Amino acid sequence: MQDNTSDTVRRGAADPSIGAALMARLDAFAAFSEEPGALTRLFLTPEHAAAAKQLSGWMAEAGMTVRTDALGTVIGRYEGTAPGMPALLLGSHIDTVRNAGKYDGNLGVLAALAAVQELNRRGERLPFAVEVLGFGDEEGVRFPVTLTSSRAVGGTLTPAMMEVADREGVTLSDALRAFGGDPGGIAGAARRDALGYVELHIEQGPVLEAENLPVGIVTAINGATRLTATVTGMAGHAGTVPMALRRDALAAAAEMVLAVEATALETPDLVATVGRIAAEPGAVNVIPSRAVFTIDARSSSDATRRAGLDAITGRLRAVAARRGLDLSLETGHEATATACAPGLIRQLESAVERCGFRPLRLASGAGHDAMAVAAAMPVGMLFVRCRGGISHHPAESITAEDAGTAVAVLLDFLRHFDPSNLAA
Ligand code: HGY
Ligand code: MN
Ligand code: MN
């Protein structure tokens, strides 16, 4: 394998101008939002479309051919030493949570683009093509499913998943058609031709900062389940119905929320979160007749996650029975724990070492598109330090120096990438 490393990269020092340019681009990209002054960019929204258009333009400027797949994923391709070579896929997601930080997802896409831009600037070609993917639905905030665009690439997206609706009653398939996508094109979005997928992402945790390291290599991604619980009781006059005769859906839900927390506190390697709750009819003087809340449960062990969910649902049903209310539970998303390919772990480690840093392996508590893409190819992840491990919050931050280091490691990895034996 030809060694194209430049002196700068050989010394491991990142080019500060690359880090600075990447940070400026991330700032500009954060302007594509549902609301000024905060970053909220949900799947198949006008702000998603505007961000995808901007990303496509930047990809073209970096010497890439650009297309959009049936699920709205922006795909930039940088040819290898000959046209049509198998591609190594890079990328992450460009959708966000509500009031998000600038780096979750977007850093992975724009850092990969920065690496390709540097190859293009130097006129470098590798013995494989490189594609950068900007997925549109990793967070799963708008619809009750998630990872749909990366599931399409992984070949596991089903037509049934397209019929879920957002809170306004718009189905995913209708929103996709309005966006310019094609719900009938799911099969065509699957990628069986790629060499592998490597995702750069902020750690969203405190480990790298505690270890005083700019980057780390991911070993595995925790499995996750998302459910929606609907508690049904009886509305009534807040002033006249005696407490003992009430079937208060919100009071029951409140007890259930604490049961979710208690189960996770008692179970090692299980985390569980109720992120959203709503009560109806929502009047100050009416006993709530209905409460709906979400549950997000995760573990590095699928057995632990499933046993934890059984314990949680058992406790919720006991609360409903004791209070005389109805309870329905619907699973919206389930992703099994995903191991990164040993060959990609090794090669990312070597790149980190060549760039002058101690290679640290760590697991991911957060979910990522790599979980879905893993159904079709070997996957790897490179984590970047973020301040205080803060994420899913506007205080999410990284340094320009770490941004530059991340691109330098990615470039070194690309220049040494060997597609053989990745799974071994
Ligand atoms: O929820 C997650 O783990 C990811 O940030 N979507
Ligand atoms: Mn993310
Ligand atoms: Mn996220």
Image (spheres, rainbow, N blue to C red):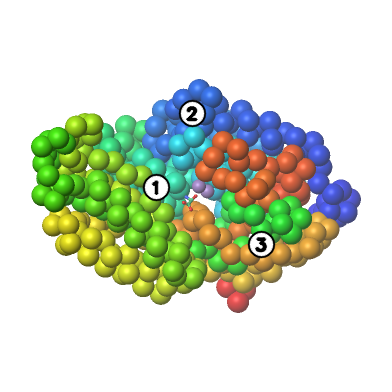
Residues 121 and 83: in front is: 121
The local crowd at label 1, few if under 14, some if 14 to 19, many if 20 or more residues have their Cα within 10 Å, is few
Residue sitting at 31 percent across and 69 percent down?
Answer: 310
Answer with mark 1 or mark 3, whichever residue precedes in sequence. Answer: 3
Residue sitting at 44 percent across and 46 percent down?
Answer: 139
Q: Secondary structure at mark 1?
A: loop
Residue 233 seen anywhere in this rendered image of the structure: no
Residue holding disc 1: 275
Residue 136, compared with residue 160, is above or below; it is above
The amino acid type found where label 1 is placed reads Gly
Answer with mark 2 or mark 3, whichever residue precedes in sequence. Answer: 2
Answer with mark 1 or mark 2, whichever residue precedes in sequence. Answer: 2
Q: Is mark 1 within 8 Å of ligand 1?
A: no
Left or right, 288 with respect to 60, comes to: left
Residue 310 seen anywhere in this rendered image of the structure: yes
The local crowd at label 2, few if under 14, some if 14 to 19, many if 20 or more residues have their Cα within 10 Å, is many
Residue 41's x, y, as percent?
Answer: 46, 34
Residue holding disc 3: 217
Q: Is mark 2 within 8 Å of ligand 3?
A: no
Residue holding disc 2: 33
